[in-house]
Image (cartoon, helix red, strand yellow):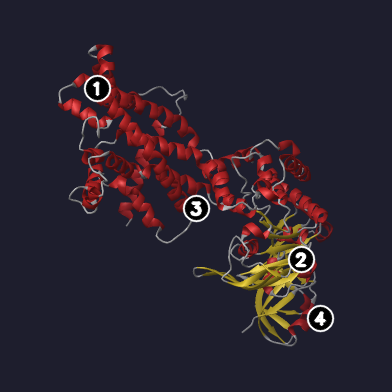
Amino acid sequence: MSAPDRSLVGAAARPRGWIERFCRPVSGNRRTSFGDIAIVAISALFLGIFLVIPLATIFSLALKNGIHAYFRAVTEPYARSAIWLTFVTAAVVLPINLGFGLAAGWAIGKFEFRGKEFLTTLIDLPFAVSPVIGGMLFVLLFGAQGIVGPWLIAHGVKIIFAKPGIILATMFVTSPFVARELIPVMQASGSEEEQAAISLGAGGWQTFFRVTLPNVKWGVLYGVILCNARAIGEFGAVSVVSGNISGLTSTMPLYIEVLYDDYNFSAAFAVSSLLSLVAVLTLVAKRIVGRHVGVGTAASASADEELAA
Amino acid sequence: MSVEVRNLVKKFGDFTALSGVSLRVETGELVALLGLSGSGKTTLLRIIAGLETADSGAVHFYGADATAISVRERKVGFVFQHYALFRHMTVFENIAFGLRVRPRAHRPSQAEIAQRVHELLKLVQLDFLASRYPSQLSGGQRQRVALARALAVEPKVLLLDEPFGALDAKVRQELRRWLKRLHQELRITSVFVTHDQDEALELADRVVVMNAGKIEQIGTPEEVYHHPVNAFVYNFLGNVNLFHGRIENGKVHLGDTILELGSAERQSVNGASGNAALYMRPHLLEIDRTSRGGKSFRATVRAINAAGPQVKVELEADWGDPVQVELDHERYRDLAIEPGESVFVCPRQSRVFIYQI
């Protein structure tokens, strides 16, 4: 027994030295070593190859044929229809997933009930399965050869190869975002404030809107931003259900694919640049909101406690 | 308003938090629920508040059954151990909350709310902090805001869960005195939970000593301190030396040492024999250089701590048990004892509890 113990100690001791060296505060007056430079260089190289160069390429290719060609590419009817459908989809999906996320986060974060673990796992399901499978599910359900599809089509309701299918598929893929973000925040804030509110005579809704929601509002916003980004960018699930009918059921990512397949690179990159812009804006918003997400959680409350003491 | 609970039973899974607890709190009384953690005291308080429901038993407010009434309608003020102030609201809004959530018909006007909140802020002496957020307050200030918030709804009963548990010793002392004054002023029927015997004895009109889901004794602080009904209460209230031995013919056998019992103890034992627990409070023991025969026992001084109002002497009895004695400084100077010396310890008073076999 003693031999593996010793090797364990040795293994733990060696990296500790390394970690200590690299975790030193930047302001320390230690001389910069070769190791420091190497680590920073590797990170910079990685960022350059995988993020900066592709992003720059998108914008440069989009503008290759001049600014007029760019505007023509993003304002032609098919492009406008794709942009419109993308944002309509996001606008429909967001409130629904927000409602679902709030309900699920509240139930899981604040209450104890049978099957809670199962529900938590179930919420993660859309993350775990490939979006393509998500799309297939809806085709199997609502398609012309599907389970309830024929009945719906007979009654004039078309879901697959139509807008409702796109919305459903996007909703499925993006449903976990708000809930995932809220569950830990709700759990961390505990239920004492809610108990206090009820003991002061507040009703269930009053407690939720006046106490629970304000405490998790930044978490909600964070979840909504992530959900929105994914709803706009979703390709796999949507591509299975949409049929990609230009001007009708084509979203921005699908439209980009069509343009690309037609060797219309500059138009494809022009539309891509819009998506990239949304992504950059999302990151900025995420950064601003992310700073506040800690506010109101137990961790920061205990930090406050220490500060006050 | 009087509060009465009858035969409360509460289980959490396999753990029995309360096993048949009955208690009556009179109008205007301040009652302490005293016990170790896990004794069921907080559960009892939460059941009175309606935050928890008992498996069986009843809660009566003013003689009327309130068991089925929800927390919302019980009109109790509950002060949480960790304050549970609303983080995103100012002190003012925290206190106003209970008034703002009232149904429109009973809701006071903005001006009335503002007036009431400022009255309460004055009462808890925090008027200057109305626009601060809870995170900007000290622990003691937060606790007073929590109290003001609970009082805002004009509760008939005030329930406090470890009200000073999270505060440091000095603030705790101050708040304790302040709460006592406040209670004398307002005369609200109040129940508070504590694990701190000093707090219970100093603050409460009556103390309820709890252990393992049961009430061990209910009485005034004097009663429970001077006339504990059983070994648990004696042990729990105040420092105590505990020796295990045998009682035979009115004498205690501790190892080879035989100790005579005083008349009061002899009476309490009532001629019985058997294994017994002997309790002696450190300040009721005396140290002598000469033997008093069967009334004292021999011990060796191990350590002396003369810092503080009393001199604490640690000894080792002949039969090997550690003994703690508290002397006043004058007596300590007269004795001039040193660690390592052999002396005699004489109990002025002790309590004997024979084991139930």
Front in this rendered view, residue A28 or A230: A230
Q: Quadrant of residue B22?
A: bottom right
Residue at the outermost left position? A262
The residue at which mark 3 appears reads as: A110
- Kind of residue at disc 2: Arg
- Kind of residue at disc 4: Ser
The residue at which mark 2 appears reads as: B206
- Kind of residue at disc 3: Lys
Compared across the picture, whether A219 is left or right of A160 comes to right
Q: Which mark is residue A109?
A: none
Circles 3 and 1 in contact, beta carbons < 8 Å: no
Res. A265 visible in picture = yes
Where B232 sits versus A139, above or below? below
The residue at which mark 1 appears reads as: A269
Mark 4 crowd level (few <14, some 14–19, many ≥20, 10 Å Cα): few
Where B186 sits versus A250, above or below? below
Between the residue at mark 4 and the residue at mark 1, the CA separation in whole angstroms equals 103 Å
- Kind of residue at disc 1: Phe
Mark 1 crowd level (few <14, some 14–19, many ≥20, 10 Å Cα): many
Instruction: Kindly state the secondary structure of the residue where label 2 is placed.
Output: strand
Instruction: Kindly state the secondary structure of the residue where label 3 is placed.
Output: helix
Circles 3 and 4 in contact, beta carbons < 8 Å: no
Chain name for mark 2: B
Residue B108 placement (x, y as % from top left): 72, 45
The residue at which mark 4 appears reads as: B263
Quadrant location, the N terminus of chain A: bottom left
Can marks 2 and 1 be said to lie on one chain? Answer: no
